[in-house]
Image (cartoon, rainbow, N blue to C red):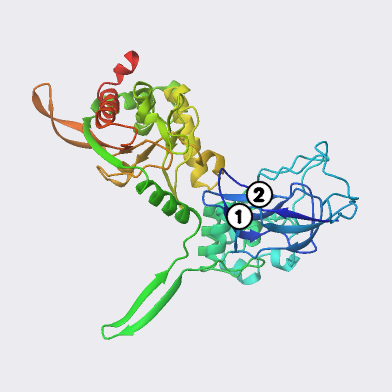
Amino acid sequence: MIAEFRLPDLGEGLTEAEVVQWLVEPGDSVALNQTLAEVETAKAVVELPSPYEGTVASLHAEAGETIAVGSPLIAFDVVGSEPESEATGQPGGEAPSEEKAQPNLVGYGAAPAAGGRPVRRARRGVSNATVQTDAAVREAAPHDALPPADAEPAVGERPRSTPPVRAHAKRRGVDLVLVAAEVGDRVITRQDVDAYAERVGGAVPDAVGTAPEKPKTAASATGDGERRQTRIPIRGVRKHTAQAMVQSAFTAPHVTTFHTVDVTATMELIEQLRADRSLSEHRIGPLVVIARAVCLALGRNPSLNAHWDESAGEIVQNHYVDLGIAAATERGLIVPNIRSAETLSLTGLADALQELTATARSGRTSPADLAAGTFSITNIGVFGIDAGTPILPPGQSGILAVGAVRRQPWEHRGEIALRQVMTLSLSFDHRLVDGAEGARFLKDVADLLEQPGRALVF
């Protein structure tokens, strides 16, 4: 029978997604859970697995096209199934039954109906001659950098790489098949793509893909000469961020308060922890200590760990902390969450933060990890900025911006001394957080950073 796969809800409340690239074509045979396409939502790049085993009948969207959740995405000629009844949509005209297994259409794969490992799709249109680097490339490349012939991947297998690396390769015009021929069977990295592109003189033709959409550059002649503009499509993370920030700015009345604090004791503590060999596996830095201080302070100031429920006419206070950490990535700013951060020790937070950052920068953050945070931290200090007025993520009542740590003259024990100081900027929703409550929370965080030992009495 012909079975249609509709675009599933890939995250909480997402209404659309853009098809980045198809990994199958009409006529291809696919296995259960084989990756069909890469789609980009407002939050992440997601690989869509096949909920059926059969043959691709047709594709309902082109690469680069944005489609709504629930819209037909791809049609299959399913193996070994009876014709589908027009009346019921079930084989043989039977009524739907709750007993029958249904594909899991939430973007995380189907429930396996049979054993065995999913099979990679054979790349169409790629021959042995294409897989092997051409003679001109080999001649130009350093000979000691080329692998032996038996290190090349098997013809027909898709090169091993992550979605962000594949997107980067498309932007640079590099065919990953040729890169895989040089790196062997390991996962291809961005560095491999860049090294290959530089070695062959920039960009090479993509053997199977199509060129990604590029920003449009326009020029017009005036009395002052040619004036140029570049137009970049608004989509993906940038589109989502813009919508969310406008919604937040015009829904919640923002108030920002600042406090400059002496963090010398915290920086000395961090140096001691880094020198401890038993903690060498944990990357404990200022942001980790600040995250722990925020969790402790939220326990004493629950109004900062709440949200305004307009439809119910209620203020909802959370008794857990899903701590959002703003991360700058190539796709834009995202805010993944550390779930139940209040239950983690300092080393636990360090490990969670390291994993969160690595996942975000590789583009592998799942939509579920980007939703429903209760409080957020943004580290603007990494850019050398002291203070700012951060906008609240929708559904949160507070966000703390962490400034740069600077050595400067400071009053200490009745004298002027060079101390390490930092400015904290707290934005909060004035509908449910009064100025006094916001000030108390900020003071609690500052006290913990001035004297980390105070955490023992919180």
The kind of residue tagged 1 is Val
| Secondary structure type for disc 2 | loop
Quadrant in which the N terminus appears: bottom right
Image side of residue 230 versus residue 107, left or right: left
Report which residue position mark 2 lands on: 8
Image quarter (top left, top right, bottom left or bottom right) of the C terminus: top left
Residue drawn at the location 85% of the way across and 45% of the way down: 95
Amino acid at the residue labelled 2: Pro
Up the image or down, 224 lies above or below 13; here it is: below
Asked whether, in this view, residue 323 is left or right of residue 5, the answer is left
Query: Which is in the foreground here, disc 2 or disc 1?
Result: 2
Residue 277 x %, y %: 43, 23
Q: Is residue 453 left or right of residue 334?
A: left
The residue indicated by pointer 1 is: 39
Expressed as whole percent of the image width and height from the top left, the position of residue 131 reads 70, 63
In percent of width and height, residue 255 lies at 27, 40
Q: Residue furthest top?
A: 457
Number of numbered labels in the structure image: 2
- Tell which of 321 and 183 is nearer to you: 321
Q: Give the CA distance from mark 2 to mark 1.
A: 11 Å
* Residue 275 visible somewhere in the drawing: no
Quadrant housing residue 137? bottom right
The location of residue 38, given as percent across then percent down, is 63, 55
User: Which of the 4 image quadrants contains residue 114?
Assistant: top right
